[in-house]
Image (tube, grey):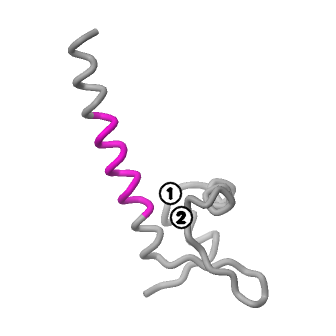
Amino acid sequence: MAWLDIIKSAKHLDCCERTTWTLINTGDLRFSRLPDGSIRIKQEWLDDYLLAREDQSTVDRIVNEVLAEFI
């Protein structure tokens, strides 16, 4: 199990560091704080976040396709 810092976490999420901080601050992304104050995030937690977002975007796509038939 790999623990990643903010920079590596952002790369894993394919986003900028600022977005990663926002996800942490809003409680959308799990993290651990080390005694020195630095942040580490398990790669597994990042993968879980991405998978949840993928599932939601799939649902959104299906709903939009169904609704498009009625417009």
**Rendered view: 40 above or below 17:** below
Is residue 11 in the magenta section? no
Q: Distance between the residues labelled 1 and 2?
A: 5 Å
Q: In this view, does 61 lie to the left or right of 35?
A: left
Q: Which mark is residue 69?
A: none
Element class at badge 1 = loop
Q: Which quarter of the figure is the C terminus placed in?
A: top left
Residue under the image location 70 percent in, 87 percent down: 34
Q: Tell me the crowding category of disc 1: few under 14, some 14 to 19, or many 20 or more residues within 10 angstroms, Cα based.
A: few
- Residue in the picture at 40% in, 52% down: 53
Give the residue type that dot 1 points to. Answer: Asp
In this rendering, the answer to whether 53 lies above or below 41 is above
Q: Could you tell me residue 19's position as x and y percent?
A: 63, 54
In percent of width and height, residue 52 lies at 38, 56
The magenta span reads 49-61
Q: Residue at x 30, y 26 (%)?
A: 64
Asked if disc 1 and disc 2 are in contact, CB closer than 8 Å, the reply is yes
**Residue carrying label 2:** 11
Q: Residues within 10 Å of mark 2 (few under 14, many from 20)?
A: few
Residue for badge 1: 14
How many numbered marks are there?
2
State the SS at label 2: helix
Which residue is nearer to you in this view: 39 or 10? 39
Q: In which quarter of the image is residue 39?
A: bottom right
